[in-house]
Amino acid sequence: MQRSFSIVSLIAFPVLATALQTNVFWIIALAPLLGTLAVVLIKWDPTGKDVDAEETYITA
């Protein structure tokens, strides 16, 4: 999967560079910020749970 993204970026980068001229730098520079924003906004901690504890189910 990672290789396919590399191939797409090799094709897409020159197209973006031509279409946007100098603004393509800012798109690439700001892309990691989107990932950081997603990590900050989505709270998920798989290490915060005790996986050995038995769950108690309430049946009504």
Image: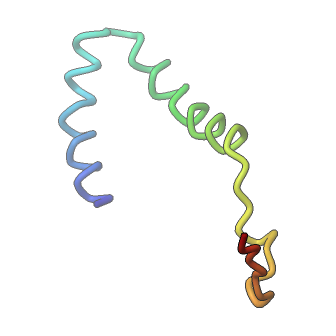
Residue at x 22%, y 14% (from the top left corner)? 18
**Rendered-image quadrant of the N terminus:** bottom left
Q: Is residue 26 above or below residue 57?
A: above
For the residue pair 13 and 51, the one nearer the viewer reads as 51
Instruction: Specify whether 27 is left or right of 44.
Output: left
* Residue 45 found in image quarter: bottom right
For the residue pair 37 and 26, the one nearer the viewer reads as 37
Give the farthest residue toward the front: 60
Q: Position of residue 41 (x, y in %)?
A: 70, 37
Residue at x 32%, y 58% (from the top left corner)? 2
Residue at x 22%, y 42% (from the top left corner)? 8
* Residue 32 found in image quarter: top right
Residue at x 80%, y 87% (from the top left corner)? 53
Q: Position of residue 9 (x, y in %)?
A: 27, 39
Q: Position of residue 14 (x, y in %)?
A: 22, 26
* Residue 23 found in image quarter: top left
Instruction: Specify whether 43 is left or right of 19.
Output: right
Instruction: Specify whether 19 is left or right of 33.
Output: left
Q: Is residue 13 above or below residue 24?
A: below
**Rendered-image quadrant of the C terminus:** bottom right
